[in-house]
Amino acid sequence: MDNALPASGLFLALASGLANGLFTTPLKLERRWRWEHTWAVFIVTSCLVMPAAMVAAAGGGVRAVIQAAPAASGWAVGFGFLWGFGAICFGLSVKHIGVSMANSLVLGVSSAVGSITPLALRHSLGFGESQIWLYLGILAFVLGVASCGRAGVLRDRSQTGASTATGYLLALTSGLMSAIFNIGYTLALPMAAAGERLGDAPFPAANRIWLLMLGAGAVPNLVYCGMLIQRGRSASLLAAPGTAASWGRAALMGLLWGGSIFLYGAAAPLLGKFGPALGWPISLAAGLVTANLMGVWLKEWRGAGRSAVRLMWAGLGWLGGAIVFCAAAGFAQ
């Protein structure tokens, strides 16, 4: 493989992770709206507006691709809908345990499951040079997440005297559900192949997958947020004076996270035959490093003991190693 291709894919995967690691920061800075208002606007922006705009910018037209790959289109919708429940759990886990810990647990579980499964689906599990580097990357990722997770437990005990069990349970559930996202993308790749046969470039062809997956995932999120808004009779907050900044923060969340998804979609085809298995841990590791650094900036570790802080930085070191190992897997193909 031309080394320029994995290098470009690596850059896009890292950029995807950077955007992913940053997107929850506005949620922690919000003071006027409740969680459900911010999350609803975020979902509309990232899962409905952005995918539709990206597909329309490339010339639109989804029906022909669905007709050419009906089974793959069904996988995209089904797995996207299931992923939507994981997104709800993730948003709530950030509310309970903060940016750094929620991202560490969710992305860690998602990476391990979401990287190995695409290899199994493609019958590519083995011990070639590229796979060995990838396995080392996943191992480093798991060690990094374990270190960050332990650091979070110690931090919670030193700050509040106890761990927030609900937040950790939500994060672990979200991690398992979020892995479905990459599995669904892998199963839906025949949609992109059908689009290319119909004359699309690889990037616009992949965007049609996101249109179906994210649109389906938006449904449970918006239903849940609508229920919370109705129960709290708080719909008026969306139009209250002085909420322009709240709209802006929620829309920025959507642009960052939606951007991370489209960047990942552009990265995967450039990373060779193991694209989804390689791009996923690289993107998530970069996102985790970013999210943990943002957690430091948001003072989520203020008052934590030295052991917790040392474990957190050790975890970031392992995550950095995971990026290096997965990058080596790309170049070894």
Image (tube, helix red, strand yellow):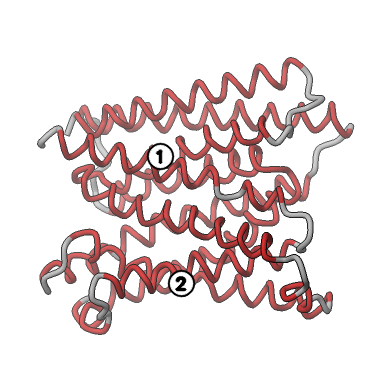
SS class, disc 1: helix
Viewer-side residue, 212 vs 130 = 212
Q: Which residue is mark 2?
A: 49
Query: What residue type is disc 1 on?
Result: Pro
Residue visible at 28% across and 47% down? 267
Residue visible at 60% across and 41% down? 105
Mark seen at residue 281: 1
Q: Is 158 drawn above or below residue 82 in the view shown?
A: above
In the displayed structure image, the side of residue 122 where residue 243 appears, left or right: right
Viewer-side residue, 254 vs 173 = 254
Residue 307 image point, x, y percent: 72, 16
Residue visible at 47% across and 74% down? 216
The disc, 2 or 1, on the residue closer to the chain's N-terminal end is 2
SS class, disc 2: helix
Residue visible at 53% across and 72% down? 218
Viewer-side residue, 86 vs 316 = 316
Viewer-side residue, 217 vs 30 = 30
Tell me how many marks there are.
Answer: 2
Query: What residue type is disc 2 on?
Result: Val
Q: Is 33 drawn above or below residue 138 in the view shown?
A: below
